[in-house]
Image (spheres, rainbow, N blue to C red):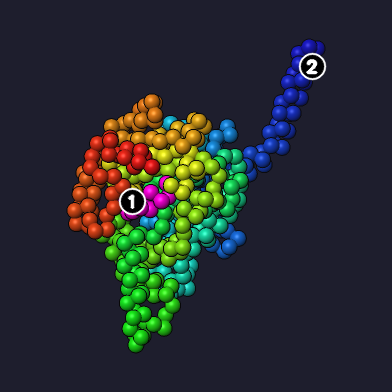
């Protein structure tokens, strides 16, 4: 008798388990996977390529914003090191309009040729900011968001923080874009003035902005000399041209004045070949209260994402785990020696390795293109690399 009852109970429990499994199967089958990749169609009609890994256990999400001539692949070295140390952090990388796979799709879909400069519509930086807000909503991102921008991407990060302060916790600005390249801007404006001095010049029919865009074309056309990555695909240069057009009105200082105090981590490259010293000094004076931290990376040029991925990954993991880095700390970083000095504290991390290509690139750039090269710091050694942080 007991055996029959026991068997009956086992069968009943087995049946109940089967019903539960059957009922929950659709939920399991249709649940959102942790890793997504593809194109997100936005309400604006634009479509952006993205790769997204959702966070676990309430970890924050890093949103990676590419530099002007970069794409999602540019972050591979940094991401590999982050994922090796912290599998729970969320990561969203994507190609903005004018970049990478998004640009490739634009070329296929467009009724005009995006491979030439003729009649190209500019890509306003404000439009990029709106697209990021729409992408975050489309992917239903929740929890803490930390924006990480390289160069042009830092401008989008700042503009996003200013317009949507409740959607992101903070931003990391690596080699931040502050304003148009000073010498390039000066040369173009001089060319516009020269046109106006000759009333019979047929170019006088154009507005100042149209003339500026016209004279910008030959400037952008020689960018591959300084950034060889642009020579890989012919469609990259027109894409960069459209973004440069759209970013000309951006002011980092004006935008920073709209940010919350202590909301950005700024990483300066000590050998940045694109930033003018005066631009840096003015930004630091006017935006210092927004700095959660400020780092200067010794012997590093503008593209620090490619050059020092070990330190960038270490720093991002540090601000994720240590919410105390919020008081404007000044950090002197020696990425090739594997340490950083933060007041009396010393951080140690896996040292980055300087490639022969980096050495050749910097030496060539600074030797042959010195008229348009600005060093933040003069000379060598820790004292010189700390100079910018100590002077103001």
Q: Identify the element where label 2 is drawn.
A: helix
Image coordinates for residue 217, horizontal then vertical, percent: 34, 70
Please give the name of the residue rendered at 36% of the width and 30% of the height, measured from the top-left corner. 341
Please give the name of the residue rendered at 50% of the width and 50% of the height, measured from the top-left corner. 256
Overall secondary structure of the magenta section: helix
Q: How crowded is the residue under tag 2: few (<14 C-alpha within 10 Å), some, or many (20+)?
A: few
Nearer the N terminus, badge 2 or badge 1?
A: 2
Residue 215 to residue 146: above or below: below
| Residue extent of the magenta highlight | 273-284
Image coordinates for residue 65, horizontal then vertical, percent: 46, 50
Please give the name of the residue rendered at 55% of the width and 51% of the height, measured from the top-left corner. 258
Which quadrant is home to the C terminus? top left
**In the depicted view, which residue is nearer to us: 206 or 153?**
206
Could you tell me if residue 151 is visible in this image? no
Question: Is residue 12 magenta-colored?
Answer: no
The residue carrying mark 1 is 277
Q: Is residue 41 left or right of residue 2?
A: left
- In this view, the residue farthest toward the top is 2
Image coordinates for residue 243, horizontal then vertical, percent: 43, 62
Image coordinates for residue 165, horizontal then vertical, percent: 59, 47
Q: How crowded is the residue under tag 1: few (<14 C-alpha within 10 Å), some, or many (20+)?
A: some
Quarter of the figure with residue 16: top right
**In the image, which disc is placed on residue 5?**
2
* Badge count: 2
Residue 166 to residue 15: above or below: below
Please give the name of the residue rendered at 22% of the width and 56% of the height, measured from the top-left corner. 370
Which quadrant is home to the N terminus? top right
């Amino acid at each position: 008798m007991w055996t029959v009852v026991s068997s009956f109970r086992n069968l009943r429990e087995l049946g109940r388990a089967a019903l539960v499994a059957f009922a929950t199967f659709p939920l399991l089958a249709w649940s959102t996977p942790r890793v997504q990749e593809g194109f997100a169609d936005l309400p604006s009609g634009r479509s952006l390529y993205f790769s997204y890994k959702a966070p676990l256990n309430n970890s924050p999400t890093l949103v990676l914003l590419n530099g002007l001539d970069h794409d999602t692949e540019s972050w591979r070295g940094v991401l590999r090191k982050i994922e090796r140390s912290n599998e729970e952090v969320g990561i969203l990388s994507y190609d903005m309009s004018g970049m990478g796979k998004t640009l490739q799709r634009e070329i296929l879909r467009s009724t005009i040729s995006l491979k030439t400069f003729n009649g190209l519509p500019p890509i306003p930086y404000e439009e990029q900011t709106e697209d990021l807000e729409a992408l975050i909503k489309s992917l239903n991102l929740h929890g803490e968001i930390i924006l990480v921008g390289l160069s042009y991407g830092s401008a989008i990060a700042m503009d996003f923080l200013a317009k949507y302060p409740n959607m992101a916790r903070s931003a990391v600005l690596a080699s931040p874009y502050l304003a148009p390249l000073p010498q390039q801007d000066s040369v173009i404006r001089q060319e516009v003035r020269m046109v106006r001095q000759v009333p019979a010049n047929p170019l006088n029919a154009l507005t100042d902005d149209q003339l500026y865009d016209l004279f910008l074309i030959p400037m952008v056309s020689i960018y591959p000399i300084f950034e060889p990555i642009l020579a890989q695909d012919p469609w990259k240069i027109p894409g960069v041209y459209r973004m440069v057009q759209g970013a000309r009105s951006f002011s980092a200082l004006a935008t920073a004045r709209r940010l919350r105090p202590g909301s950005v981590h700024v990483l300066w490259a000590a050998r940045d070949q694109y930033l003018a010293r005066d631009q840096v000094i003015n930004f630091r004076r006017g935006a210092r209260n927004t700095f959660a931290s400020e780092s200067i990376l010794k012997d590093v040029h503008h593209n620090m994402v490619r050059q020092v991925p070990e330190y960038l990954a270490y720093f991002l993991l540090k601000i994720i785990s240590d919410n105390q880095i919020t008081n404007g700390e000044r950090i002197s970083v020696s990425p090739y020696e594997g340490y950083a000095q933060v007041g009396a504290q010393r951080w140690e991390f896996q040292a980055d390795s300087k490639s022969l290509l980096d050495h050749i690139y910097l030496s060539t750039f600074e030797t042959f293109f010195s008229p348009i090269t600005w060093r933040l710091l003069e000379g060598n050694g820790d004292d010189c690399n700390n100079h910018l942080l100590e002077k103001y």
